[in-house]
Amino acid sequence: MTVDLKQFRSEGQAAFEQTGLPTRKLEQWKYTPLNKLEDLGFGGFAAADMPSLDALPASVPDIDAYRIVLVNGRYSDALSDMSGLDDRATLIGLDAAVTDSLDVVHGILGHQVKTDMPMAALNAARFEDGIVLHVPKSVALEKPVHLVSLSVGSDNAVAAHPRLLISLGENAEATLVESHLSIGDGVTLVNGVSEISVGPHARLGHYKLQTEAANATHVWLNGVTLHDSAAYDSFVLQLGDGLVRNEVRALLDGEHIDARLNGAYFGTGSAHIDNTTFIDHAKPNCQSREVFKGVLDDQSRGVFQGKILVRPHAQKTDGHQLNRALLLSPKAEIDSKPELEIYADDVKCSHGATTGDLDPDQLFYLKARGIDEAQARAMLVQAFLMESIDVIEKQAVRDVFADTLQARLTKMFGDMS
């Protein structure tokens, strides 16, 4: 079935022209306005050229997985390695999937994410490539899929608008790991959209690692629809030095769904890290959990906006939301905005936020045992963040994320062994 991309892009362009870049006037963007992007030289936000790379950078995590690579938002066959992938599943570049008129593209493109949000509209107008992952009914992938997204800077500002289409059929199972990295010191923008559909009784583990450089702006919207008895386990680890916004909008469109949206972040320098979530409990008997923990140092800023909506017929909803932040510097800042909007009476929902410095009693305990203050502070930061990674279901992914975080903490504080 053919997808009318011309009309899709035209609708995206028209929507973006109506809104423009997000400013503080938009409630969802008041802590992370993007109206200064045009001043950085992105112009019309056209997709960047795809540079030729001979090999992956050494900083790409080594994961035993089916690897698919995007360079400035475009699929790289030379750097990808999908050998051994079950031929019943589809893992392909989006441009090739459109060319081949794959039904999965028509079935999901534009259905999970609409163009009524500014950056989603810009993505619809400008995307040229991305990936398609489709796991049919009752198929379980033996290894994770590892998406490596490389932002390669140049003398001019570089913009990429990748789009990911992820579809799991009934009783299917897959793990998707995303690694987002920068090459070079050029100014880059990644404005990504993921459209994710998880069928009845299917399970998707979705884990994202973001380590882009100080000159990078990373904005990504994940639109997720979950059906009866589906399970969605997501985690984002944000260690980048630039501006990053990770937004998840999850629709629980069935009963007995288990949705988990968790994350950890460590901000230094002038990093700006925004996590915005919206969980829509549209049907009864569902559970959602989200816990985000972060550490902010220097002049970095964190943002957490989490909303849980419980619709009138969504009885027996169980929703929990928590944001915890440590501020290591008087110039660091966190804006936390947890929300509950409930229209059903038989529910169990809670939300909360805590912000503070390291516990002085814990510091005293460590110092009393001969550990100097700098080392003690480093150990407490390590324990605080490592605890959050323990919730990742997949052991192999958990180990990779823990190693990546440990390397960053060692770079910041020195060896803590």
Image: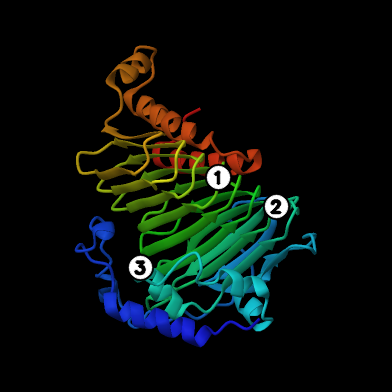
Q: Of the residues shown, which amino acid type is indicated by label 2? A: Ala
Q: Which residue, given by chain and number where applicable, does mark 3 sit on?
A: 117
Disc 3: CA contacts within 10 A as few (<14), some (14-19) or many (>=20): some
Q: Which residue, given by chain and number where applicable, does mark 2 sit on?
A: 172
Q: Nearer the viewer, mark 3 or mark 1?
A: 1
Q: Which residue, given by chain and number where applicable, does mark 1 sit on?
A: 255
**Residue 189 image point, x, y percent:** 40, 69
Q: Is residue 47 visible?
A: no
- 166 up-or-down from 309: above or below: below
218 relative position to 68: left or right:
left
Q: Is residue 195 visible?
A: yes
Q: In which quarter of the image is the N terminus?
A: bottom right
Closer to the chain start, of discs 3 and 1, is 3
Closer to the chain start, of discs 2 and 3, is 3
- 383 up-or-down from 239: above or below: above
Front-lying residue, 88 or 350: 350
User: How far apart are labels 3 and 1 at the CA level?
Assistant: 28 Å
Tell me the SS state at disc 1. loop
**Residue 86 image point, x, y percent:** 79, 60
Front-lying residue, 222 or 219: 222
